[in-house]
Amino acid sequence: MPRPSISGESPSCPPDEAAGSGIPGLDPGRLHEVHAAGDDRAAALAFALVQAGAGGRPLFLVRPRGGGRRRAGLHGEGLAWLGLDAARLTLVEAADETVLLRAALDAARCPALAAVVIESAGRLAAYDLTASRRLALAAERSGSRVVLVRIAAEPRPSAAFTRWTIASAPSAPLAGAAPGRPVLAARLDRRRGWAGRQAHWLLEWIPERDSSHGFFRPLPPASPETASPETASPWPAAPVPGAVAALAGLRGGAASRAA
Amino acid sequence: MTLADARARCPELVTTPEDPARTAAALERVLAALGRFTPVVAADPPDGALLDMTGCAHLFGGEAALLRILAEEMTRLDHAPRTAFAANAAAARALARHGAHDGSDDIRALPVAALEPPAETLVALRRAGLATLGDLAARPAPALAARFGEGLVLRLRQLLGEVAAPLVPRGHAAPLRAEERFPEPVARTDDVLDVAEDLLRRLGRDMEERRLGGRRFVVTLCRADGARRRLAVETGRPTRDPAPVMRLLRERIESLADPLDPGFGYDSVALAITRSEPLSPHQIGLEQGKEAVDDSIAALVDQLAVRLGPEAVYRLVPANRHLPEVAQAALPLAQGAPGRAASFAARLGESPPRPLCLFDPPQPVEVIAGVPDGPPLRFRWRGHLFAVRLAEGPERIAAEWWRHEGAHSGNLAGHPENGALTRDYYRVEDSEGRRWWLFRHGLHAEQAHPQWYLHGQFP
């Protein structure tokens, strides 16, 4: 099968896509940041867990202890619906930010994990350049991915290898105007050693036959059956037009995979 | 008597299925409690205990006082004991199990059933007109043995005290404990911990001989001025290896609210392993990858559980209920590795999609619906208005009426945590593309103005 080389056609696109997904994956041994707005928490977590949880190894999710009025937990059946076995996922709840980062650092040092996903909401003051450098070093040494999901937070200088912004995107309706399969709008804001400045994808979650596995596959950005033009991108004013992935490359990628 | 007969005679009878494991555990607890009366305690499964009180009764003020104290002790453990004293264990057992409740201790007045013979022997004894042990004892033993077997005569002679009926007392394992006293007080905590590591190594050899592994380790630091400090750590799986335990201990010391103060120094350190489990000698496999993975994750879980509390490190497991918020349970990993639990994936086929994030408690929202039973058109949550673009539903989830008194008649309303009203769930997508899980709490037939709640978010 001829693999479409996005980087070959569009120099603004990052190299080395994750096998089979058509977008750059979350590399092992690196620290990744996933940003999302407050109402896109589920989308950001789904992206982080599915992209980082490749392979059968265990996952750790470190999160603030649910307290107060808005406590939102994970749902095991929802995980299974995304193709993630709840038996692989260990949840760790930390009382405050410092403890959260320290627990995440300990988990990141464990070489047996596929990934450590850290969930945070708000500013996360304890996450400074030093803390991010520590996490990045721990990931480098253990070879597991460390994914920091930052909900409703301003991006801050950090030692992260990639920075993504994830939002929910309109799905292709099923019969009877029912919501379809999950669709995310992913924007790669930054990747070390990459000249481009931004790249956009619309990702649709594709279940495999037995629906116990699945992956995010890029959709052609403005294909008429998935989205109307005004809702295709959740960022109305895309600031860097040159950084958008070449349409041809993505279309080719999606088409050749569908074939 | 069959269960149906029993129920017909006593309609308010409460029945539970037999659980031999729980019965055995309860008996074990009773035996442990009885250890305060005498060192020689033997089990008489499934529900009895034999105590050799020789030379012990006077410590409790005589036999009558002893029985009173024992009854109090058993009542505290929620058991109602039947007790009897006799000159030998077999007789005491027969009096307790088959004796009249008037406190008489006449062995010969006991019915022949006290010998616990097989059913046909019992019938034959009764047909022969032999009602009590006294009747049997009056007959010549060889004739009885010829007719009913040697076993019956042996049991009879045991009851009458002619043949010894020895007890097999419950064994006591030697406690796993070690102590080191210093000739001079040691002021550095690190040095004391090094000694504790030595003690651990010593006890590790002890445990290896007994094929045990420790789960709970308690280090007691005794200061020269008499103050004691106890540090306890637990591991998720039994271990004999000092290194992980020492790591947990150092973790515990770091996370202490008031730090260790050596004062003028410690003059002794004691290590006790208060909980242990069987642990066979470890065989090193040819492929070590899998074991190393399991070990490093277990060590990580232990470390996090010590620092954050055992409840803070958990896995989600399915629970046997169908309301979404209680269909899963958090299983703390520090209490040992979970067994092969059922998987959530098994439910995939039978239910519509479930959200990834679940709000706990459900968030009340204001909803505008087109028709009373229809999906929402718009909803307002935390001051934001969400316009619904696509909707699917309802998926009706009935209330767990069997858990609430009066709930089946619809008397209970109020917050969904009561779980007493039917819910109609809708999967909706708003104009921005976010997918939500909303439910209407109560049918219109159940409630005049059902409240809507936001219960989850799909990716």
Image (tube, coloured by chain):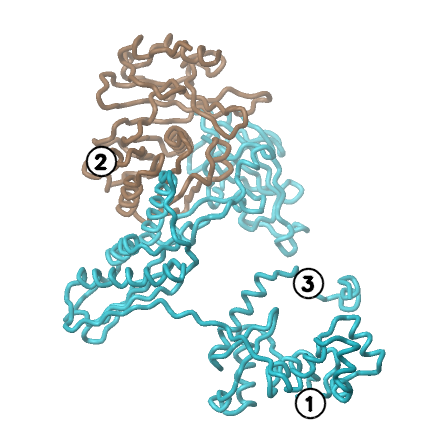
Chain colours: A brown, B cyan
Q: Residue at x 68, y 79 (%)?
A: B155
Image x and y of residue A135, in percent: 25, 37
Which chain does the numbered disc 2 sit on? A
Say how many tags the image has.
Answer: 3
Tell me the quarter of the picture where residue A57 sits: top left
Tell me the quarter of the picture where residue B146 sits: bottom right
Image x and y of residue B25, in percent: 54, 65
Q: Residue at x 80, y 78 (%)?
A: B125
Which residue is tagged 3? B15
Tell me the quarter of the picture where residue A242 sits: top left
Q: Residue at x 69, y 89 (%)?
A: B106
Which residue is tagged 1? B106
Q: Are the residues flagged by discs 3 and 2 from a single subunit?
A: no
- Horizontally, is B76 left or right of A38 in the view? right
Q: The disc labelled 1 sits on which kind of residue?
A: Asp
- Determine whether B200 is above or below B156 in the image: above
| Secondary structure of the residue carrying numbered label 3 | loop
| Secondary structure of the residue carrying numbered label 1 | loop
Q: Earlier in the sequence, mark 1 or mark 3?
A: 3
Quote the CA–CA distance across marks 3 and 2.
61 Å
| Secondary structure of the residue carrying numbered label 2 | helix
Quarter of the image with the N terminus of chain A in it? top left
- Determine whether A102 is above or below A142 in the image: below
Which residue is tagged 2? A137
- Crowding near the residue tagged with mark 3, few <14, some 14–19, many ≥20 C-alpha atoms within 10 Å: few
Q: Residue at x 43, y 59 (%)?
A: B277
Q: Marks 1 and 3: which is nearer the front?
A: 1
- Horizontally, is B434 left or right of A31 in the view? right
Q: The disc labelled 2 sits on which kind of residue?
A: Leu
